[in-house]
Image: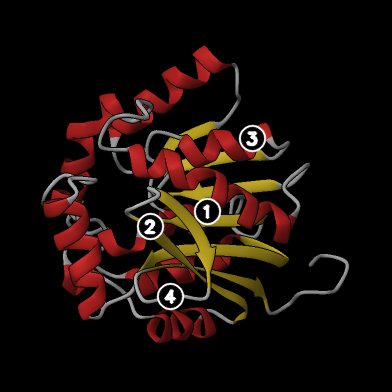
Amino acid sequence: MSNQNVDRNEVAKFEALASRWWDPTSEFRPLHEINPLRLNYIDERASLAGKTVLDVGCGGGLLSEGMAQRGAHVTGIDMGEAPLNVAKLHGLESGVKVDYRQTTVEELAADPEQAGRYDVVTCLEMLEHVPDPASVVNACARMLKPGGHLFVSTINRNPKSFLFAIVGAEYVLGMLPKGTHEWRKFIRPSEMSNYLRQARLDIRDLTGMTYNPITKAYRLGRDVDVNYLMHAVDSRKDESAS
């Protein structure tokens, strides 16, 4: 693992929580609450039905199963053995078919049988947990067919994100376990845009995700100060593919 773009400590965090991944009242409650927003965002822009999809950093399979339920042929990859086992078990219980594999996207992109075969690649809430996010974005781009869609999401790096994503979410509201995030690993939209352009992707959209502590509801909008999603398309695109 030392030669891979993997942080052992980050993997261990999610390994320890894996058994509670599908419990909507657990530490993963925020993921359950934002999953419909994420699914709609992706589906509205890439029309998931019938598409081949790679979910990078799939964890326990929440997004992977959601995309499969919308008609996509999904492969989910992660480096955490325990979350993948939970994902596989839940798939057996739900009857939703996803191909789960323990690997990194860089390793997958090095396989000529895998590179360039996906209509859609998703990498959500994962890039802030790896040592080299640019490497992940570049490998994700190599997995796309010409005209394929890449969706990423992460957390902005500024004083507001420290206050909301760490102090508020982890210490005040208790929405996430303490230590889930490291502020220095957050990624500004300008940095993410640079990663995408270096990977020869055309940026199509930047959308923020906000949480209202009074209504306890998430919504998408223009505020990208904390959480945000980005949509990019392979620069070899043609209009029929996009």
Q: Which of label 2 and label 1 is nearer to you?
A: 2
Q: Quadrant of residue 88?
A: top left
- Quadrant of the drawing holding the C terminus: bottom right
Q: Which of label 4 and label 2 is nearer to you?
A: 2
Q: Which residue is mark 2?
A: 212
Position of residue 210 relative to residue 80, above or below, is below
Position of residue 133 relative to residue 50, above or below, is below
Indicate the position of residue 16 as horizontal and vertical percent values.
17, 33
Q: Which residue is mark 4?
A: 224
Residue 5 appears anywhere in the view: no
Q: Quadrant of residue 206?
A: bottom right
Mark 4 vs mark 1: which is more N-terminal? 1
Residue 172 appears anywhere in the view: yes
**Mark 3 surroundings within 10 Å by alpha-carbon count, few (fewer than 14), some (14 through 19), many (20 or more):** many
Residue shown at 22%/59% (left/top)?
A: 3
Q: Amino acid at mark 1?
A: Asp
Q: Amino acid at mark 3?
A: Ala
From mark 4 to mark 3, how far is it between C-alphas? 28 Å
Q: Which of label 4 and label 1 is nearer to you?
A: 4
Q: Which residue is mark 1?
A: 111
Residue extending furthest top? 93
Q: Which residue is mark 3?
A: 68
Q: Amino acid at mark 2?
A: Asn
Mark 1 vs mark 3: which is more N-terminal? 3
Tell how many labels.
4
**Mark 2 surroundings within 10 Å by alpha-carbon count, few (fewer than 14), some (14 through 19), many (20 or more):** few
Mark 4 vs mark 3: which is more N-terminal? 3
Residue extending furthest front? 214
